[in-house]
């Protein structure tokens, strides 16, 4: 969904979809194949319901990041963030 939203809002200069940037990796052993949230208990006990649909919430989130590039840049410049990215993504095999 996020790739589709980004394709609409900020298409890549090369014309490819954002999904082409995804690198799929082997699943870890014992990994759940499906995550399905059941809100019946919180609805029943507290009367809580989501205030928006998932797609609408994703659209709002993407819009926020796109309208706050200075905040995004400040996070990307932090050394602890760079170290986390290196440890968790760039130096993986």
Image: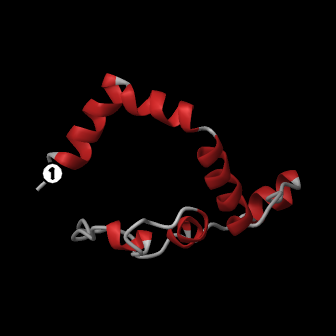
Residue at left offset 21%, top offset 71%: 26
Residue in front for this viewpoint, 17 or 1: 17
Residue in front for this viewpoint, 3 or 85: 3
Quadrant position of the N terminus in the picture: bottom right
Residue under label 1: 92
Residue in front for this viewpoint, 85 or 66: 66
Residue in front for this viewpoint, 15 or 32: 15
Residue at left offset 25%, top offset 31%: 83
Query: Is residue 34 shown left or right of residue 65?
Result: left
Residue at left offset 76%, top offset 67%: 53
User: Where is residue 14 drawn, in percent x and y?
Assistant: 37, 70
User: Where is residue 39 drawn, in percent x and y?
Assistant: 72, 64
User: Where is residue 77 drawn, in percent x and y?
Assistant: 37, 27
Query: Is residue 18 shown left or right of residue 59?
Result: left
Residue at left offset 68%, top offset 68%: 55
Q: Secondary structure at mark 1?
A: loop
User: Where is residue 49 drawn, in percent x and y?
Assistant: 83, 59
């Amino acid at each position: 969904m996020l790739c589709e939203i980004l394709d609409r809002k900020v298409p890549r200069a090369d014309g490819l979809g954002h999904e082409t940037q995804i690198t799929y990796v082997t699943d870890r052993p014992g990994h759940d194949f499906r995550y399905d949230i059941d809100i019946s208990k919180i609805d029943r006990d507290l009367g809580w319901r989501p205030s928006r649909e998932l797609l609408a919430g994703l659209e709002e989130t993407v819009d926020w990041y796109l309208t706050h590039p200075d905040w995004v840049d400040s996070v990307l410049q932090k050394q602890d963030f760079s170290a986390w990215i290196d440890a968790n993504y760039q130096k993986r095999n």
